[in-house]
Image (tube, helix red, strand yellow):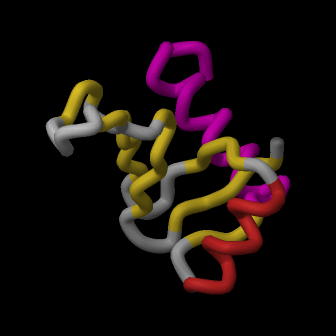
Amino acid sequence: MVKAVALSTVHLCRSPGEKSPEGKVIKRAEIEVKAPGAIFDVDKKQLDDLVAKGAARSATKVDLARADEAVQMDLGQA
């Protein structure tokens, strides 16, 4: 898994849905929505696909440090 930064809203399918032989939905797909600027984990293949579409990029050390700093400020630790 690699860290990615969303450049626009990204919709990730965490588990696919299922349909009955008649075409009725048995189980809905689980979709996770990531807002622009959000840092999230994806596999290398997904990251390559998102980069090609211009929806995400690899997270840098600066991105990760800023996210960590923001979390610490939210918790009152900084």
In this orientation, which residue lies closer to the viewer: 24 or 56?
24
Q: Establish if 38 lies above or below 37.
A: above
By secondary structure, the bulk of the magenta-drawn segment is best described as helix
- The residue drawn where x is 57% and y is 84% is 53
Question: For the image shown, how many numbered marks are present on the structure?
Answer: 0
Closer to the camera in the image, 10 or 35: 10
**Is residue 39 positioned above or below 27 on the image?**
below
Q: Quadrant of the N terminus?
A: top right
Position of 67 relative to 52 (above/below) = above
Camera-side residue: 38 or 22? Answer: 22
Residue under the image location 68 percent in, 42 percent down:
41
Q: Residue at x 49, y 15 (%)?
A: 75
* Residue nearer the viewer, 29 or 51: 29
Horizontal side, residue 12 vs residue 45: left or right: left
* Magenta residue span: 59-78
**Looking at the picture, how far across and down is residue 65, in whole percent?**
74, 44
In the image, residue 72 lies in the stretch drawn in magenta? yes
Residue 40 position within the rendered picture, expressed as x and y whole percent measured from the top left: 61, 44
52 sits to left or right of 48: left
Q: Is residue 56 magenta?
A: no
Residue at 48%, 34% (x, y): give it. Answer: 15
* Quarter placement of the C terminus: top right
Q: Give x and y (percent) for residue 70.
A: 54, 36
Quarter of the rendering containing residue 29 = top left
Instruction: Indicate the position of residue 27 as horizontal and vertical percent values.
Output: 28, 26
**73 on left or right of 25:** right
